[in-house]
C-alpha cells in the first residue's frame, strides 16, 4: 500500500458539527490511518476529537499530499480543511486530542495496523463503534486498527486468542496496543502475551 502524509494550518477552530479537517475518500477507495498530530497555535485550551464521516458535507480546500514511495498509485483520499455550510454525519470514535493553553501544545497519536483475531478458549465480548459481539472458541473477528476496541474476557474461565497483524516496520519488537484513556496505560494488566513471529515481509 502506498504511503502519503499531509498537513494544514487553519485560523478557524471548526465546531461541534463542522470538522476542522477531514480525510475525504470514496466508498470504492479504502485507506489506513497511521498517525494524527494536532497542535495549538493559540493560548486558548481546546479539545479535538476523532470521528468517522458517513456523509460528505461541505469540506474546505484540499491539502497537497506528500508521497513517501516513488512511482506509487495516486492517494485514495484527500485531506480537506475546515467544513463550511453543510455538516457531515459523524460517529465519535472515543479518541480525544486535548490541547493546552499554550502555543505549540500538541498531541500525536499513532495507530497499529489491521488484523484478524481467533478465539482459542473461553469467551470474549468485543465492542467496536457501538456494535458488540460475543464470541466462542473457533470464532474470529477483525479489528481495523484505528477504531478503539473494548474487549471483555470471561470471568468464569481463562480466555485466550491468537492474532495476526501486518504493522509498520517501526513497530518491530514494540507493543502495538494504544490505550484510548491514558490512565489505563499504567494500570496492572492480568493478561499475558506470547509472540510467535515478528518478522519483516520482503516484497
Image (spheres, rainbow, N blue to C red):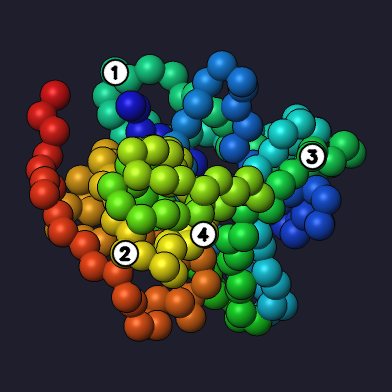
Picture layout, residue 37 above or below residue 131: below
Task: Give the image location of residue 35, x and y in percent.
Answer: 43, 51
Circle 2 packing at 10 Å, graded few (<14), some (14-19), many (20+), is few
The image quadrant where one finds the C terminus is top left
- For this rendering, which residue is in front, 194 or 122? 122
Task: Give the image location of residue 77, x and y in percent.
Answer: 54, 28
For discs 2 and 4, the disc positioned in front in the rendered view = 2
For discs 4 and 3, the disc positioned in front in the rendered view = 4
The disc, 3 or 1, on the residue closer to the chain's N-terminal end is 1
For discs 2 and 1, the disc positioned in front in the rendered view = 2
State the image quarter where residue 188 is shown: bottom left
The image quadrant where one finds the N terminus is top left
Marks 4/3: CA–CA distance: 23 Å
- Disc 2 is placed on an element classified as loop
Marks 2/1: CA–CA distance: 49 Å
Marks 2/3: CA–CA distance: 40 Å
The disc, 2 or 3, on the residue closer to the chain's N-terminal end is 3
Q: Are marks 4 and 3 in contact (CB under 8 Å)?
A: no
For discs 3 and 1, the disc positioned in front in the rendered view = 3
Circle 1 packing at 10 Å, graded few (<14), some (14-19), many (20+), is few
Picture layout, residue 81 above or below residue 188: above
- For this rendering, which residue is in front, 32 or 180? 180
Task: Give the image location of residue 18, x and y in percent.
Answer: 80, 48
Horizontal side of 142 relative to 15 (left or right) equals left
Residue identified by numbered label 2: 158
- Disc 4 is placed on an element classified as strand
Residue identified by numbered label 4: 150
Amino acid at each position: 500500500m502506498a504511503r502519503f502524509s499531509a498537513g494544514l494550518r487553519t485560523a478557524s477552530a471548526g465546531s461541534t458539527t463542522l470538522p476542522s479537517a477531514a480525510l475525504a475518500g470514496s466508498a470504492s477507495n479504502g485507506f489506513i490511518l497511521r498517525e494524527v498530530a494536532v497542535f495549538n497555535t493559540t493560548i486558548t485550551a481546546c479539545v479535538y476529537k476523532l470521528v468517522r464521516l458517513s456523509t460528505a458535507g461541505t469540506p474546505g480546500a484540499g491539502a497537497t499530499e506528500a508521497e513517501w514511495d516513488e512511482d506509487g498509485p495516486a492517494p485514495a483520499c484527500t485531506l480537506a480543511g475546515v467544513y463550511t455550510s453543510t455538516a457531515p454525519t459523524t460517529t465519535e470514535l472515543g479518541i480525544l486530542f486535548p490541547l493546552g493553553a499554550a502555543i505549540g501544545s500538541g498531541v500525536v497519536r499513532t495507530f497499529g495496523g489491521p488484523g484478524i483475531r481467533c478465539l482459542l478458549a473461553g469467551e470474549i465480548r468485543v465492542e467496536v463503534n457501538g456494535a458488540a459481539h460475543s464470541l466462542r472458541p473457533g470464532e474470529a473477528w477483525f479489528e481495523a486498527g484505528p477504531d478503539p476496541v473494548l474487549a471483555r474476557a470471561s470471568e468464569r474461565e481463562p480466555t485466550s486468542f491468537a492474532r495476526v497483524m501486518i504493522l509498520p516496520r517501526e513497530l518491530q519488537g514494540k507493543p502495538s496496543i494504544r490505550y484510548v484513556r491514558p490512565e489505563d496505560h499504567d494500570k496492572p494488566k492480568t493478561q499475558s502475551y506470547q509472540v510467535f513471529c515478528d518478522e519483516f515481509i520482503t516484497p
